[in-house]
Image (spheres, grey):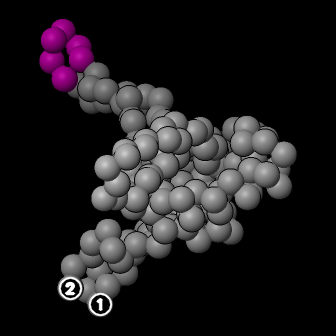
Amino acid sequence: MRLSGMNFNVNMGDLLVNVDTATLTITDNSAVSITSGVPDGYVDGDVSATGELNLNASNFNLISEAAQRAGAWRAMETFDIMFYGKTQKDELKVEAFGCRIKLSDILDIDKKGGQASLFKVPFDVTSPDFVHINGVPYLRPEEIENIQQ
């Protein structure tokens, strides 16, 4: 059996949430170095990572309770998100560090019914630890060694 979305668990800090869909996108602005119109290596660029979780009402309420404990949605501390999937044949662990959520589409009501309401929870990765894939950091150690957290 191959790895599919059904095989993934998602932990937001210490909360286990079930997501309908989830994304994590890394933007790496490294570029090719050009001399006299000819490629001659590369230069590092800035990086960022963003994602989005789509949750049903019960799982959205788990996050809502955490926001209530913090006193406000924007008062929530950053947290790490871990996406972990495993089958007999494959395993994948992706960690995003220092995530800060921003609410987006919190209502999408369709009176016809037929499907559960979903809540979109976008997030930004804010920690220099950035993203690790199967335990391997995306950034080199020297890229973050002088960054104070």
Left or right of residue 80: residue 139: left
3D distance between C-alphas at marks 1 and 2: 7 Å
Marks 1 and 2: CB-CB under 8 Å? yes
Left or right of residue 132: residue 62: right
The picture places residue 54, in percent across and down from the top left corner, at 44, 53
The picture places residue 149, in percent across and down from the top left corner, at 75, 43
Three-letter residue code for mark 2? Met
Q: Which residue is mark 1?
A: 88
Give me the residue at 47% from left, 29% from top: 46
Badge 2 density bin: few <14, some 14–19, many ≥20, Cα 10 Å:
few
Give me the residue at 24% from left, 17% from top: 34
Say if 79 sits above or below 147 in the image: below
Quarter placement of the N terminus: bottom left
In the picture as drawn, the residue positioned furthest to the bottom comes out as 88
Tag of residue 75: none
Residue stretch rendered in magenta on the structure:
34-39
Q: Nearer the viewer, residue 103 or 45?
A: 103
Q: How would you classify the magenta stretch by its main secondary structure?
A: strand
Say if 114 sits above or below 135 in the image: above
Three-letter residue code for mark 1? Gln
Q: Is residue 36 magenta?
A: yes
The picture places residue 137, in percent across and down from the top left corner, at 49, 56
